[in-house]
Image (cartoon, helix red, strand yellow):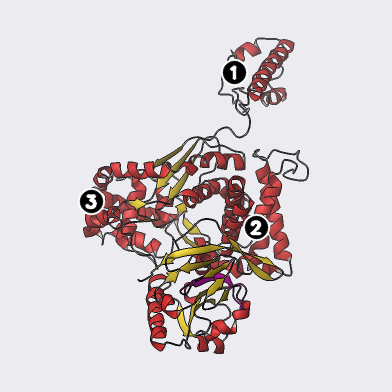
Amino acid sequence: MPWRGDGRRRKMLRYDVACTGDAPRRVTRRRRAVTSGFLSFPRSSLRSLGRPLRVAALCAFAACCGYVGAARIALGQDAPPRPAATLTCRVDPAVELLSVLTTLAGPRGDRPPLAHAYAREALDRFGPYADHLAVRRAAAIADRGLEDFVAQVAARVGPPPGLVERPPIYAVGDGPVSVSADTIRALVAAARDFARRTSFMDFYREHAALYRTLCDRVLADSVLATAPTRVARFFGLSSAAYELVLMPLVPRLGVAPPGVRAGPRATLTAYVGPAGGRDGGDPVFRTGWSIERVVLHEFAHQHVNSAVYGAASSLARSRTLLAPVRARLWRADHVASWPGAVTETVVRAAVAEMRGDAAGDAAERDELREQRTLGFSFVDSVAATLRTARRPDAPPNGTAPNVSAHDARWWPGAMRRVVAMLDRAAASPHRDELSDPPFDAGMAHALIAAAPDSVLIILPTEERDAALQDSLRAHVERMRDRFVRHATIVTDREALARDFRGWTLWAIGTLDGNAWLRAHAAELPVAVDRERIVTDSAYRGEGLVFVGAQPSPLDARRALIVTVGQRVDELARGWWIFSSDYAVVDGTRVLTRGTYTVEGGRRRFVPTMGVDTSGVVGRQP
């Protein structure tokens, strides 16, 4: 036939498509028929026609496909993205096997051991095998701070005892701080032996009812039901399935599997750890925004990872931005490389944008502020860049036509904008200030963002009652050993005599008794006297306590936490830390709490509705 060897056949093949209502795709030579949903004819019948009739037949076929496509669009069936799949939940046997190994290895860092009944059963059942090679290999990885390995390794193997590898096996970790694929394979080999020797799958099957109960409880949280749709709408791309894998033995917020790229055939997975558990009770998982944030974060990773690491060569130009916050990013999420930092920043910015879409601008600002404090300094700028790229009137690059906010075409252009923004920041003469901005967060995040050995607690020496002053010091030492065990305790006189720039400061006492607090009273936004505490309103009483966080007067990039009481005896009984910027408490009763805004260089109190006693810890009667 005249079009077989002269190049025209190749040209015709470029227009051979299957019109199935989904995106057109090229038909390879192996496909023997050209089809639509209700129209099919073999290629041989095309070849038997003369060229004019072939062209006419193909045109008629194209018109048919166009009609079908137009009908689907008219019915709203092609409105991007298509509805996301239902969220499912399971407990994975490979995850549980590796979790048991880390549990036998013991708690790491400052984290206490899990106390719920399931953890105790695992320790009782597998304790005799605590010296097994698999436990030692798991402990060696956990000792490097890489607890994500449980989910990331389990995602690439089949169920125990075989643990059949699903290539490729990826290294675990970020950049220079990682564990090689060969080390992972050695762990898997040892874990196979552990699973066989201990009959691990019997243990797993015995707890099937518990696993179903945990999943039912988590999925009963109505906010999670919309997570797949929210992620799909944000990125303009739906995936085939969305699932949660619960990790009741892994004290980790969440993990995304390696090597998964969102798309119509992909299953997006969020591995989710517990919030804790009551002694003797079941593991307890987070609820509300606390768990929704984790799930959105892990699903977003599977949209973002490939785009960022694909731009790694372009990101090399801005890698100097990592140095000022490297230590904070490692503490925040074990980030050790600039591509890793950019990935986490983009994911957190996307989650903040999704939060704003659902709950409003104030909720988005709170989310961005929290992430900035953790060390993701450019999260506000990245969020603004994503917001601009998602606008219906904003093309993803300088030449492409405008796109809808729910169209996947906005995303590649957004990444180019992010790279350009980071290039500008790296070239700025204010680069270091941009990378490490002033502290702006609540009390809890002041401690989370601080290096464990850079927290300085300042205690009074001038309280009127020396016995109560000694009692306060003993109480603070007990609370320090429980909650911030690496913090240093000094007196107010020592704090005034030395330069503690670079430290997170925590001053405790009354204004009369703590000389350091008295010296910096003008910089505190609160007024405290014997009859009242004045914040967003005047609160009257005789045993009230103000707690709050603000930039340190010695180093604005670090925090100052203050615990100021009307009476020292009340301070010697309580310990208060909230996620909010400030609170006024009366014993265990929270009178007010909220955030600050800065106007004219002064902090203004903005109370938050509702009562929260979650920050009242360690109080003695």
The part of the chain drawn in magenta is 543-558
Image coordinates for residue 193, horizontal then vertical, percent: 27, 51
Q: Which residue is mark 2?
A: 380
**Up-down: is 317 above or below 505?**
above
Q: Quadrant of the C terminus?
A: bottom left
Label 1 and label 2: CA atoms lie apart by 49 Å
Question: In the image shown, does 314 or 510 lie closer to the viewer?
Answer: 510
**Image check: 113 left or right of 384?**
left
**Image check: 473 left or right of 606?**
left
Residue 322's tag is: none
Q: Which residue is mark 1?
A: 35
**Image check: 344 left or right of 165?**
right
Q: Amino acid at mark 3?
A: Arg
Q: Amino acid at mark 2?
A: Asp
Query: If you read the primary sequence from the N terminus, does the residue marked by circle 1 or circle 3 appear first?
Result: 1
Instruction: Name, please, the residue furthest toward the right.
Output: 399
Image coordinates for residue 392, horizontal then vertical, percent: 72, 40
Give the structural element (helix, strand or loop) at label 3: helix
**Up-down: is 410 above or below 171?**
above
Q: Which residue is mark 3?
A: 197
Query: If you read the primary sequence from the N terminus, does the residue marked by circle 1 or circle 2 appear first?
Result: 1
Q: Is residue 117 magenta?
A: no
**Image check: 399 left or right of 289?**
right
Mark 1 touches mark 2? (CB < 8 Å): no
Give the structural element (helix, strand or loop) at label 1: strand
Name which quarter of the figure residue 339 lies in.
bottom right
Which residue is drawn at the image coordinates 70% and 46% (left, top)?
389
Image coordinates for residue 97, horizontal then vertical, percent: 32, 50
